[in-house]
Image (spheres, coloured by chain):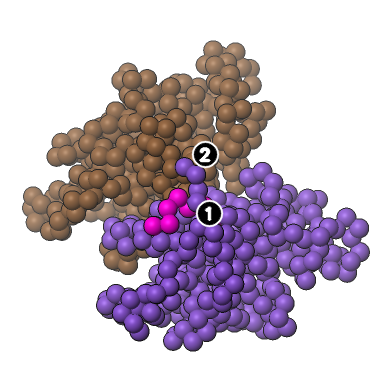
Chain colours: A brown, B purple
Amino acid sequence: MKLASLKSGRDGQLIVVSKDLGRAVSAAKVATTLQQALDDWHNIEAALCSLYEQLNKGVLTESFAFNPSQCAAPLPRAYHWVDGSAYVSHVELVRKARGAELPESFWHDPLVYMGASDAFIGPCDDIEVACEEWGIDFEAEVVVVTDDVPAGTSREAAKGHIKLLGLVNDVSLRNLIAGELAKQFGFYQSKPWTSFSPVLVTPDELGEAWDGCKLSLPLRATLNGRLIGAPNAGVDMTFDFPTLIEHCAKTRSLMTGTVIGSGTVSNVGSKEGSCCLAELRCLETIAQGKPSTPFMSFGDRIEIEMLDAAGESIFGKIDQRVVQSIL
Amino acid sequence: MKLASLKSGRDGQLIVVSKDLGRAVSAAKVATTLQQALDDWHNIEAALCSLYEQLNKGVLTESFAFNPSQCAAPLPRAYHWVDGSAYVSHVELVRKARGAELPESFWHDPLVYMGASDAFIGPCDDIEVACEEWGIDFEAEVVVVTDDVPAGTSREAAKGHIKLLGLVNDVSLRNLIAGELAKQFGFYQSKPWTSFSPVLVTPDELGEAWDGCKLSLPLRATLNGRLIGAPNAGVDMTFDFPTLIEHCAKTRSLMTGTVIGSGTVSNVGSKEGSCCLAELRCLETIAQGKPSTPFMSFGDRIEIEMLDAAGESIFGKIDQRVVQSIL
């Protein structure tokens, strides 16, 4: 099943989207918003699936053409957004570029931070930033959305709590990060916006690419028409999603609709390229002593997408431009 | 005006509470939940105020006795919870106790972290923690709730965005904090629960104690019947609420219902005592070489309250026990 939210009010209007992303139908008779569906997922999922089956069969006369540019984030606002840094070799590379050692514990103890979830932005929304000097970067990631996860949930039990998957662009202001991390309280100003793929999908949509823990397909990030990278999200993921969930639920429960991110997808050696400019700039620094690729400028276009084995888009495309916000 | 939420579903049921906290009335004909009211605050506030006036006059036959133990947090789940550390002398003291210097920038650059907002707990709810060894502590704080705050809002303009004030107990697991802060990504497992005062109030309820920036009254924290402290929340607050809002809105907008906390209230010298055990233990460490007050144990009772100049409770009392969660 594939789900999206049309722009409408603060929480969007839930729609069911066909497998080929061509058609959509309102889910209003089942649930008005995705959060509402998640709040009662075990009762609502079957009715949404039924709509999805009918939509794919082409028997719904009320269906309409699916247009990602009319979409908000599937969850336009959420109650919990925790982003991991699950590809530890990426963290190691970033540290190497600045001559710092990676603590050994980073390979065993997941790194996560709490992100801003009150205003997720849509797949085609502009990325509004006031200053280019803040060092604007994209981060292409995979996310999962959970139902209610009790405190103390084990990794094994966590697998059953993954209800939806999607892609995000976790916009980062690189030149604000160092100062914030030095204060040890985590990211705040340096992580302004997170945009989502047009649709979230249930795990059964992913076939063999999803083993319940990792999504083993390339994640494509394209800047101004140039492919920056397409690393495989199932490769070199030090902490898989159930492990991240277990970590997040260690001392408290997670409420339904919690969004958990993988962090920038990255493969050791970066042979297939990178899912953020920071990694590319680190590679350049290690090779040439300094970075040659600049961060993003106003007007730049970033596209993020994942194709299945047949070359079809699974989640639709994140396709955004960076624009200067007017303060 | 004073607002609370009775326990009901995931978002509670909005009620208006009388000035003396004695009576309440359902707000259902105006807004079902507090988030719903905040989503359209400029249209809804007047109708809620009207109910409040009638309730205080005693003319509402449908009113009922207000019982804080039936309350959820006023916002049982929120989209954005950012907690400051606005009393910098507290941070300085904590560092002094472990022999560390406070960076000079901490006096000019606000310290904030993103907290878990998907499950705020009620004023009389148990604090469920799995292990006493995690070092269970309370933190008594003042919070404000904003409406929509545009990116780049100035400190001066921020004042007008403060719609509600309240108290919180930001439960902290002290023995998990050092490890998390060392990773620089902020608190996660170490900040499991935040509980709220029974009611939130509009700024006009606070009279001269509220100057639009700081709330100048003692915040009382009582552990097992012993007053741990009653520092004045308007004294030694390095970053007032409009300054915190300006900081938080520097790179993005904040959506209505954003909760912004002061951090543990603390006065230089701690003559009126402390609003968390960590501060008390730091004072003991500086004076005696080691702390003598233990962190909280299962069964401990924590009460947090603020009284007005006439000795009346403004927000009602946070009154909780620590219990062992069953995993």
Name above or below for residue B158 compared with residue A59.
below
B148 left or right of B43 in image: left
Q: Return the residue nearer the eye: B198 or A43.
A: B198
Q: Secondary structure at mark 2?
A: loop
Q: Return the residue nearer the eye: A44 or B172.
A: B172
Name above or below for residue B164 compared with residue B99.
above
Mark 2 or 1, closer to the camera? 1
Quarter of the image where one finds residue B281: bottom left
Proximity of marks 2 and 1: CB atoms separated by less than 8 Å: no
Q: Chain of mark 2?
A: A
Classify 10 Å Cα crowding around label 2: few (below 14), some (14-19), many (20 and above).
some
Q: Which residues are magenta?
A: B127-133
Indicate the position of residue A131 as horizontal and vertical percent values: 36, 62
Name the residue that disc number 2 marks: A148
- The amino acid at mark 2 is Asp
A103 left or right of B264 in image: left
Say which residue appears at 76% left-offset and 63% top-offset. Answer: B17
Say which residue appears at 69% left-offset and 84% top-offset. Answer: B309
Q: Secondary structure at mark 1?
A: strand
Indicate the position of residue A155 as horizontal and vertical percent values: 37, 36
Say which residue appears at 52% left-offset and 26% top-offset. Answer: A17
Decide whether residue B128 is among the magenta residues. yes
Name above or below for residue B249 compared with residue A237.
below
Indicate the position of residue A70 as horizontal and vertical percent values: 53, 37
Name the residue that disc number 1 marks: B323
- The amino acid at mark 1 is Val
Is residue B252 something one can see in this rendering? no
Decide whether residue A263 is among the magenta residues. no
A249 left or right of A32 in image: left
Q: Return the residue nearer the eye: B257 or A171.
A: B257
